[in-house]
Image (tube, coloured by chain):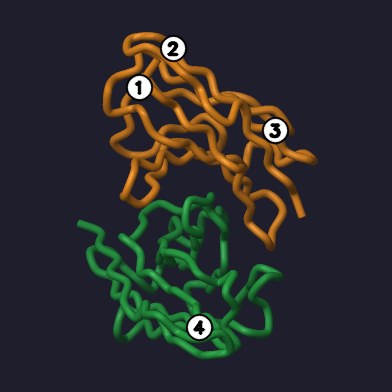
Chain colours: A green, B orange
Amino acid sequence: EVQLVESGGVVVQPGGSLRLSCAASGFSFVDHNMHWVRQGPGKGLEWVSLISWNGHSTYYADSVKGRFTISRDNSKDSLYLQMNSLRTEDTALYYCTKGPPHSSGWHTFDYWGRGTLVTVSS
Amino acid sequence: EIVMTQSPATLSVSPGERATLSCRASQSVNSNLAWYQQKPGLAPRLLIYGASTRATGIPARFSGSGSGTEFTLTISGLQSEDFAVYYCQQYNNWPPLTFGGGTKVEIK
């Protein structure tokens, strides 16, 4: 069974930093691109970042570019999101999501974790 | 950036009836379009990819159609567990990967 378990969400002040983690199991982690997607309170879904299966390529939404860094450790089946210079508008539930096998060339979100809540507030 | 627009924002449907949800892209996304279902308090679930292919375990009452800029998600014979918010997402031109604003299907 595919499982994605996020952690690291807390209340942080504007300008602060935070590192989210996602522990993956139930599939061959190294074969899949991975993403972070967020959802603000009462709002829709916003793609945040993508990392390729081997970690060599990363992509970001303009809203987080230069502030967030996605990374992965395939030896630990883990995904990370380093969040710096946090703003109140970054307040959201952050989901770790799995893409299809990287050979497919698609970027859909096949499985989702339950999310971890990041609140940016003074 | 490709903007995805969903309509209507809210759809009131009686159980057993058909629901038709629309998604429009600001430019062609070919068939690189997915649909997701999100129930309150839960993570989204992939329903459809490639505009019309059901994901693993998705019931046949869910069907997707369209290509280019106009897409439709049809739910035939709505069941109680189908009342939720539905999002479309394009993966043709990225970054960024973009979602529509969602359609809430509520009980009439």
Q: Dot 2 lies on which element?
A: loop
2 and 3 marks on the same chain: yes
Q: Is residue B30 above or below residue B41?
A: above
Q: Circle 1 sits in a helix, a strand or a loop, which is it?
A: loop
Given this view, does label 4 or label 3 mark the residue nearer the observer?
4
User: What residue did someone put label 4 on?
Assistant: A122
Going from N to C along the chain, the mark reached first, 2 or 3, is 2
Residue at mark 2: chain: B
Question: What residue type is disc 3 on?
Answer: Arg
Residue at image point 58% right, 31% down? B9
Most extreme residue toward the top, as rendered?
B17
Q: Which mark is residue B18?
A: 2
Pointer 2: residues within 10 angstroms few (<14), some, or many (20+)?
some
**3 vs 1, front mark:** 3
The part of the image, by quadrant, that contains residue B70 is: top right
Tag 2: amino acid: Arg
In the displayed structure, does residue B94 sit left or right of residue A71? Answer: right
Q: Position of residue A93 (x, y in %)?
A: 42, 64
Against A83, is A39 above or below? above
* Residue that numbered label 1 is attached to: B60
Query: What is the spatial separation of the Cα atoms under label 1 and label 4, in whole angstroms?
Result: 48 Å
- Amino acid tagged 1: Ala
Looking at the image, which residue is at 39% across and 9% down? B17
Secondary structure beneath disc 3? Answer: strand
Q: Marks 2 and 4, Cα distance to the nearest angstrom?
A: 47 Å
Secondary structure category for the residue under label 4 = loop
Q: The residue under label 4 is which amino acid type?
A: Ser
